[in-house]
Image (cartoon, helix red, strand yellow):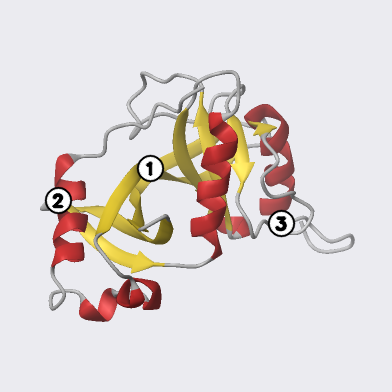
Amino acid sequence: MPLHVPPAPAPALRSVLTALSSPTAVVEARTPSLLRAQGPATAELPLPVHVLDRVTAEGVSATRLAGWRFLIRCGDGAVAAADTVLTPDGWAFSRFFEGPYIASTERALRQAETMPQPYQPRLLSVPGLYMLTLWLHEDCTADGAAGHPAATDLLVPLAPAPPGIAAHRPHRVAELLPVLTHRVTPTRLLGSPA
């Protein structure tokens, strides 16, 4: 099934396109891949980036929108990504970056396109585990900038994933959140003060 990519805020896209087209404005922010890229670079697949701030023992999560991420494509593949953030003046370009999450995101999106059910793709960051997942939200009509993971949504950990969590293996939120709860919450050592 095709993925239903939510539309990014127009100012967020404009800020990325401006950064891409201005070699002097953000020369220090360009990645080696962007500096070596031949041909035009385009910003594609805008994904809202949500941060998982808290997971309760009951599995209820508290998330917040942190920004929008665009894959930057040159030729046949993505060579970098661009992040935007919400400032008091509106959406603004934050940074270009590259690394393993770029290819892993593309792979997870291709994997999601083969699933029988349509989804709305998002990214979910779990800072306490240095983990990033592709969040496949079942409600394709939802506002991509709002909401929390539903129990039946899928999370696909991107590589590199934390030890003991398989990258690119889809998990229902109801299955993965208890694992994350155990991992993120520091356990009290036996004999230590309460």
State the residue position of label 3.
Answer: 186
Q: First in sequence: mark 3 or mark 1?
A: 1
Please give the count of numbered marks on the rendered protein.
Answer: 3
The image position of residue 94, as x and y in percent, is 27, 63
In this rendering, position of residue 113 left or right of residue 4: right
Q: Is residue 40 visible?
A: yes
Label 1 Cα crowd, 10 Å radius (few <14 / some 14-19 / many 20+): many
Task: Give the quarter of the figure containing the C terminus.
Answer: bottom right
Left or right of 3 on screen, residue 41? left
Which of the 4 quarters of the picture holds residue 129?
bottom right
The type of residue carrying mark 2 is Arg
Residue type, mark 1 in image: Leu
Q: Which mark is residue 141?
A: none
* Element on which disc 3 rests: loop
- Residue type beneath disc 3: Pro
Name above or below for residue 25 compared with residue 130: below
- What residue is rendered at 20% in x and 48% in y? 13
Circle 2 residues within 10 Å: few <14, some 14–19, many ≥20: some
Alpha carbon distance from label 3 to label 1:
31 Å
**Residue 182, horizontal then vertical, whole percent:** 74, 46
Circle 1: element type = strand
Judged by depth in the image, the label closer to the viewer, 3 or 1, is 1
* Mark seen at residue 14: 2
Name the residue located 66 percent from the left edge and 37 percent from the top edge: 177
Name the residue beneath numbered marker 1.
Answer: 47
